[in-house]
Image (cartoon, grey):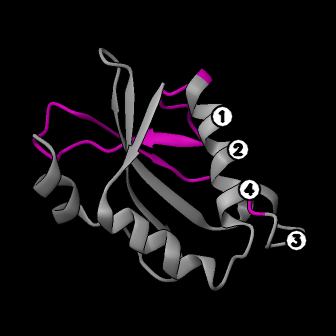
Amino acid sequence: MIFEDLPEFRKDVKTLLKKYRTLNEDLSVVQQVLAVMPDERPPFSMRIDNLGLKTCIIKVKKIACKALKGKGVQSGLRLVYAYFPNEPKIVFIELYHKSDKDNEDRSRITGNFE
């Protein structure tokens, strides 16, 4: 599995690293899981529909963060990525905490994918 990310995603990570020091380590665990099971798996992840895109966009709702002790997968972190099963490739689009934003940035998704 090939992992890529958007420049905006890198900015998201850099901002969140100030709050959550273990974020890089947590994201590497997420990559290991996605390398084996990249498709949506409710209730952990779900497909984002109604974007008018052919690309499969998935939002992961349950990410364990070691910096948030006692929270486990209830950390509140959200990860949005595009999955290309034919290549096989995953492009990370957005990472945010649910208290900072209500929903994913749909303009970022539609601006980068077709």
Q: Earlier in the sequence, mark 4 or mark 2?
A: 2
Give the Cα distance between marks 3 and 1. 21 Å
Q: To which residue does mark 3 refer?
A: 69
Q: Residue furthest top?
A: 86
Q: To which residue does mark 1 refer?
A: 32
Within the magenta stretch, is there residue 106? no
Secondary-structure class at tag 1: helix
Q: In the image, which residues are magenta?
A: 36-65
Q: Are marks 4 and 2 in contact (CB under 8 Å)?
A: yes
Q: Amino acid at mark 2?
A: Val
Q: Quadrant of residue 66?
A: bottom right
Within the magenta stretch, is there residue 42? yes
Mark number, residue 64: 4
Q: Work out whether 48 lies above or below 110.
A: above
Mark 1, Cα crowd under 10 Å, few <14 / some 14-19 / many 20+, is few
Give the Cα distance between marks 4 and 2. 9 Å
Q: To which residue does mark 2 refer?
A: 29
Q: Work out whether 90 lies above or below 14.
A: above
